[in-house]
Image (spheres, rainbow, N blue to C red):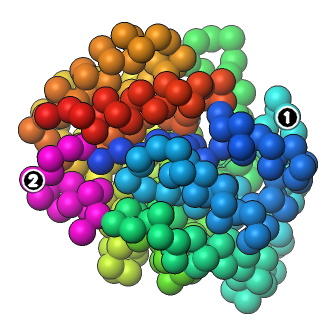
Amino acid sequence: MSPIKECIKRKKVNTNPIWIMRQAGRYLPEFRKIRKKNPDFIKLCLNKNIVPEITLQPLRRFDFDAAIIFSDILMLPYGLGQNVKFTKGFGPSLDKTSIKLMKSVNKGEFFKKLNPVYKSLNIVSKNKLLKNKDLIGFVGAPWTILVYMQNRQSPKKTKALNNFSFKKTFTQTEEIKVIKIITNFLKLHIKKQVENGATLIQIFDSWAELLRTEKAREKFIYRPNKELVDYTKKLGVPVICFPRGVENYKRFCNVAKPDAVSIDYNVNPKKIIKQIDIPVQGGLNPKVLLGDKDKIKKEALKYLEIFNDHPYIFNLGHGILPETDPEKVKYLVNLVKDFK
Ligand code: CP3
């Protein structure tokens, strides 16, 4: 059994498994070289001749316990007929969409558009580098996808600290309808990833923090995540949820019941360990990797020690920053592997 699965199944492990969110990407010079030659990001995600190699790049350098397929959560709106563009320094821009447009897309068209993603998974899943390691497939959670579909770009940080603004295109009643459509297509997307070799699914609810009341979180975060978790478990594959900034991780875990929960860097690890008993992943602030080795050691050991008697998958509290030096990643991986 792979180290991550052993951890999830609460088997005694000698060392903590480790992988890093956004591990295949911009902090690696070998990725930047490929990216330079492929200015269209969506096209790159759909290139089955290149995606398997990008997915494996981090494993060629570091002893990670998983590869994550090189793709994006915004492939879903793309599959639903909403074009997506990425601009340097700005991030994603999405075309307008409507319920009518979404409803006009059938399964066959959706699969046809995203087929290269599944093909790439199929190719990487056979690679020897993945022996006894997991291949992670992923989706954005329905709420996070809805935010991008309506706002058509990343939510903006407003001047008031910790406050974000985002546009709504749909009324509340429409929002519920759209969440349903999105959820159904997310299920198909999960199923195809699993059928093509994903051995683990992670659900990113990157904008969970935008909802400030329990009532709204119940409707848009907890229950939609639960629906996808149940669905993925039925496929026989473990599922990790990352409800970034959700505030009430306890309630999230009680309702959604993922196999493991990934915590963001604002979560107090000592507190969370008292609140939830499922395996935990992540937490370390990605900024720590921009500091010197002493700082990295101090911060990483903090997590390793707190989670010493709790099933724990080492990871960061959000994606790795593009300016991270790969040498620091190597240092971190060795540190985690040498612990205990
Ligand atoms: O290495 C990996 O983790 C696999 C690939 C992966 C990407 N995006 C590639 C990518 C994964 C798992 C994602 C998830 C993703 N995408 C999320 C959830 C995680 C999170 O960060 O909260 C979100 C919100 C997106 C949407 C998205 N994609 C944004 C906002 C941006 C622009 C800003 C940024 O972070 O780069 C992207 C672009 C993107 N996705 C890049 C990569 C490697 C950079 C593209 C480039 O080179 O310009």
Check mark 1 vs ligand 1: CB closer than 8 Å? yes or no. yes
Bounds of the magenta segment:
1-16
Q: Earlier in the sequence, mark 1 or mark 2?
A: 2
Q: Position of residue 230 (x, y in %)?
A: 35, 71
Identify residue for label 1.
88
Task: Locate residue 193 relative to residue 50 in the image: left or right.
Answer: left
Identify residue for label 2.
12
Please give the name of the residue rendered at 71% of the width and 37% of the height, measured from the top-left corner: 29
Q: How many marks?
A: 2
Q: Quadrant of residue 53?
A: bottom right
State which quarter of the image contains the N terminus. Answer: bottom left
Q: Quadrant of ligand 1?
A: top right
Is residue 303 visible in this depiction of the protein? Answer: yes
Query: 15 or 147, which lies in front?
Result: 15
Q: Is residue 166 magenta?
A: no
| Amino acid at dot 2 | Lys
Q: Position of residue 67 (x, y in %)?
A: 49, 57
Q: Position of residue 217 (x, y in %)?
A: 43, 45
Query: 180 or 25, which lies in front?
Result: 25
